[in-house]
Image (spheres, rainbow, N blue to C red):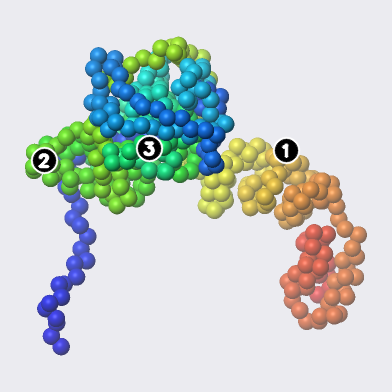
Amino acid sequence: MKPNKSLPATDNRQPATPDYKALALKSGLEIHQQLDTHKLFCNCPSLLRNDEPQYKIKRTLNPVIGETGIVDIAAKHEAEQNKNFTYQVYDTNCLVELDEEPPHAINQEALKIALQISLLLNCKIFPITQVMRKTVIDGSNTSGFQRTMLIAHDGYIEISSGKIAIDAVMLEEDSARRADNRQPTTDNRDPIFKLDRLGIPLVEIATGPHMHTPGEIKEAALKIGEILRACKVKRGLGTIRQDVNISIKGSNRVEIKGFQDPKMMKITIDKEIKRQQECVKNKSCKNEVRGALPDGSSKFQRPMPGAARMYPETDHPLIKISRDLINETKKNLPKLISENKSYLQEFGLNDELIKLILKQNKIEDFKVLIQEHNNPNLVAKMLTLFQSKKIIEVDKLEEILENVANKKIPENEVKTIMQKISDGESLDKASEKSNINLKEEAKKLIKEKPNLSQGAYMGLLMGKFKGQVFGKEVADVLKKLI
């Protein structure tokens, strides 16, 4: 049969990878991570709400002259949209978020976490910092500005290709979130925001433009993510946001905001390279901010902001970071996941148990319990696999391990005892042996059901006297009878 020439041949070839070196690709990251504390300039909880608000307020925001004496181009662009904004207010908000009251003293716990992150990024800490106002009039701040401050500078991380500079670490307040979960666009009039997220402490990390391939960008993002997860940060969807700055030869720097999935990094970067190549060809390159779309492409949001949008916050004093505070923070730096993994591997634990300990954040409990009883596998299982919905405190686990060490509890019955304690029994009660005559019960069962295996008899007896006998006791009796 002759082939049907009317059908085009299927092309299974993957798109060609761009020559990043020839393109002179430059890229940097901006990573924003929420901290797991109360809000930055008040004592309101950092709690997201999905119920009905108590009431609503409406605002119109106007641009102001920045520290340089001119209005920022991005603020001017937003003002030209002539939007009105509605804000949903909850009982977990206060007058600070409504911009009806000056900021309170900065959240000291958030400041210490920001210092930890800065030191893990090998940064130099500013001894004195000024809270600044950054003009933002897209509706995401009731005041028309975001409070932010420089905490540290000139750090670095190491990836496989070398060092990547960390230009700055900033501590700032998160923005309000859209009530409809959409981002502001020029064709969406009169947006509605929730005030639940506004003011949550946020650390922003800015790298230098020293990454020249998507692989380097992804590796750097994952390394920074590991450092952040070692500290007290919020976890889950929306708690971390990544922006990437990209330029090629002949083009201007473009910032793409809001791409989350590391798997999309290469697709997003390659599509932006292709777009910038067209801009270079058509001599239409602009400095701009674009929003990431699910397919890896991007959409124009606003012109690139500049220094004109920054001016000092006069309602908060200068923040002094003492040498004593820095030294104290250095002494209490958390370990990275990679470091904790190496520590656990030294005890011969398998990968599954190591993963569970790290995922459940049980590393410090492991260190405590391993001093009590040098049985790494048992300790690891007690902390992870043997725990039920009602978590048993570490001091109670210490008592159990002490009884194991003193031969009061068989090691293979620890799981059963822990289950009894979770059900409300005391350790003494859970450890009690029953008055059941196992030998007679086993004889009776063997007579009723002859010729079964030892395992089968054991299963039947354990099922009959569930929670009342220990497996070792049953096994010892059966060995003598069979």
Indicate whether 339 appears above or below 136. below
Q: Residue furthest left?
A: 282
Looking at the picture, does residue 482 appear above or below residue 84?
below
Q: CA distance from mark 1 to mark 3?
A: 52 Å
Mark 1 Cα shell of 10 Å, populated few (<14), some (14-19), many (≥20): few
**In the displayed structure image, the side of residue 128 where residue 79 appears, left or right:** left
Q: Quadrant of the N terminus?
A: bottom left
* Rendering coords of residue 164 (x, y %): 31, 33
Amino acid type at image mark 3: Pro
Query: Mark 1 or mark 3, which has the lower sequence index?
Result: 3
Residue located at (91% from left, 59% from top): 435
Q: Residue furthest bottom?
A: 1
Label 1 vs label 3, nearer the camera: 3
Task: Please name the residue shown 77% across and 51% down the image.
Answer: 423
- The answer to which of 436 and 83 lies nearer the viewer is 83
Q: Amino acid at mark 2?
A: Val
Mark 3 = which residue? Answer: 191
Give whichever of discs 1 and 2 has the lower sequence position: 2
| Label 1, label 2: how far apart the Cα atoms are | 66 Å
Q: Nearer the viewer, residue 301 or 156?
A: 301
Tag on residue 395? Answer: 1
Image coordinates of residue 124 in percent, x first then y, are 38, 20
Question: What amino acid type should be assigned to the residue bearing mark 1?
Answer: Asp
